Image: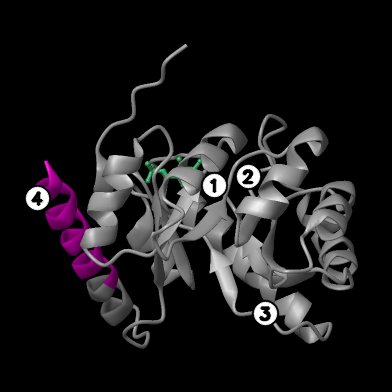
């Protein structure tokens, strides 16, 4: 079991390197975030033993429990799921990064609740690049105003943008969604923000995301296997 997670991570790293090379990008320019949601702390430990340090969680309670359980390890926790305002304090205390900022109110609460003893919370603004009403993220036309407001909050450091594209077999449609995020990021740089993170790409679309400029891929299934949700 431990071997399979180690092998999977090695395989994903090789795929990232191959995609970087194919896109003419510098080796090491894409970080791997291992998405450990629904998997036990033991699976995180196995990935950690294989050298993985950044882990992503979607559910506040699960982040809190796992972060406490694995407090002895040098893990960088990324919160990547929908965040309700009554749960921000837990995330402000347990996470190093939050990728899923879609409203200023949530960002303000995270900034207020970030303990002074910790470095600023590293954040990305999530953009709904597909335009589907059901999807998380701010509208593309709201991204700039939200990003500028988030960047001004004292206890947050805005690192860039994040998206979850609409799953599609249409490679061009997918590329268009990734390109939109990259274009918005460029507009924010032009507006004066210093940003280094484009969080896009998951198990199924890693290569396309890297070709489109991703600097951080969020990979769950390809490392830990299929998820089984319990009700
Ligand atoms: C679950 C999840 C991932 C990982 O997806 P896989 O397809 O398992 O790689 C990435 N990003 C977010 C926001 C997720 O919720």
Query: Dot 1: what SS?
Result: loop
Left or right of residue 65, residue 60 in this image: right
Camera-side residue of 135 and 222: 222
- Give the magenta part as a residue range: 1-16
Q: Is residue 231 above or below residue 219?
A: above
- Residue shown at the point (46%, 42%) measured from the top left: 66
Closer to us: 87 or 102: 87
Element under disc 4: helix
Query: Badges 2 and 1: C-beta atoms under 8 Å apart?
Result: yes
Asked whether, in this view, residue 177 is left or right of residue 139, the answer is left
C-alpha gap between disc 2 and disc 1? 6 Å
**Position of residue 115 in the picture relative to residue 167 (left or right):** right
Which labelled disc corresponds to residue 3? Answer: 4
Instruction: Looking at the image, tell me whether mark 1 or mark 4 is earlier in sequence order.
Output: 4
User: Crowding near pointer 2: few (<14 within 10 Å), some, many (20+)?
Assistant: many
- Mark 2, residue position: 130
The secondary structure type at the circle numbered 3 is loop
Label 2 C-beta lies within 8 Å of the nearest ligand 1 atom: no
Identify the residue under disc 1: 165
Sooner in the amino-acid sequence: mark 3 or mark 1: 1
Q: Residues within 10 Å of mark 4 (few under 14, many from 20)?
A: few
- Label 3 vs label 4, nearer the camera: 4
Mark 2 or mark 1, earlier in chain: 2
């Amino acid at each position: 079991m431990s071997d399979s997670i180690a092998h999977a991570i090695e395989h994903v790293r090789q795929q990232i390197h191959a995609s970087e090379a194919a896109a003419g990008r510098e080796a090491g320019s894409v970080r791997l975030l291992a998405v450990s949601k629904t998997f036990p702390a033991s699976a995180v430990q196995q990935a950690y033993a294989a050298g993985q340090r950044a882990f992503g969680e979607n559910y506040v309670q699960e982040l809190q429990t796992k972060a406490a359980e694995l407090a002895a390890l040098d893990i960088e926790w990324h919160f990547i799921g929908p965040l309700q305002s009554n749960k921000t304090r837990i995330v402000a205390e347990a996470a190093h990064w939050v990728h899923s900022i879609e409203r200023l109110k949530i960002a303000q609460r995270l900034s207020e609740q970030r303990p002074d003893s910790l470095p600023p919370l590293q954040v990305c603004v999530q953009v709904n690049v597909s335009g589907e009403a059901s999807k998380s993220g701010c509208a593309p036309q709201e991204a700039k105003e939200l990003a500028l407001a988030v960047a001004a909050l004292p206890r947050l450091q805005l690192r860039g943008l994040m998206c979850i594209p609409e799953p599609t077999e249409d490679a061009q449609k997918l590329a268009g969604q990734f390109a939109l995020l990259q274009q918005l990021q460029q507009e924010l740089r032009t507006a004066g923000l210093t940003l280094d993170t484009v969080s896009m790409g998951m198990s199924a679309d890693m290569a396309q995301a890297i070709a489109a400029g991703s600097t951080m891929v969020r990979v769950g299934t390809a490392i830990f296997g299929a998820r089984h949700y319990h009700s």
